Amino acid sequence: QVQLVESGGGLVQAGGSLRLSCAASTRTFSSYGMGWFRQAPGKEREFVAGINWSGGRTNYADSVKGRFTISRDNAENTLYLQMNSLKTEDTAVYYCAAARYGDSVILSGVGFYYWGQGTQVTVSS
């Protein structure tokens, strides 16, 4: 069982930045592919970004490409999401997720089976 705890959410003005963190409670963090997802009110949860076990491969939803950066620190068992140039439409609860699959599955944003509790990001105009 892997526990994931997100932090770093908050209220920010449009155009601002936030950095989300996800701390994982496992000594085998480096064996998991990781992802960030978000869910806005009244909408389905959507894939935001994925990263393979080593951090060498990443993938992003078109809506965040060029603005968000996913990264990981395997020594610290932590996943990050740097969010720049935030827009009001980025407002959502953000979740991190983990799974042990091949890179192609992880980077496609499907099949994750460990989830955090989420952190709220609100972008005001």
Image (spheres, rainbow, N blue to C red):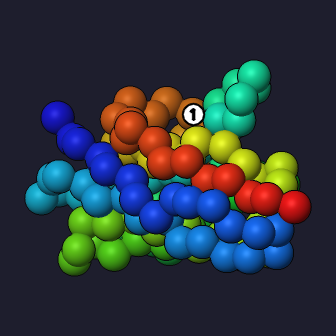
Locate the N terminus by quadrant.
top left
Answer with left or right where residue 55 lies relative to residue 62.
Answer: left
Q: Residue at x 76, y 69 (%)?
A: 13
Front one among 115 and 125: 125
Quick check: 26 above or below 43? below
Front one among 104 and 74: 74
Answer with left or right where residue 72 lies relative to residue 39.
Answer: left
Would residue 57 be seen by someone viewing this image from the given angle?
A: no
Front one among 26 and 45: 45
The quadrant where residue 99 appears: top left
| Relative image position of residue 118 (x, y in whole percent) | 46, 42
Looking at the rendered structure, the kind of residue marked 1 is: Val
| Relative image position of residue 51 (x, y in whole percent) | 51, 60
Q: Secondary structure at mark 1?
A: loop
Instruction: Provide the residue designation for mark 1.
Output: 110
Would residue 124 be seen by someone viewing this image from the given angle?
A: yes
Q: Residue at x 63, y 61 (%)?
A: 11
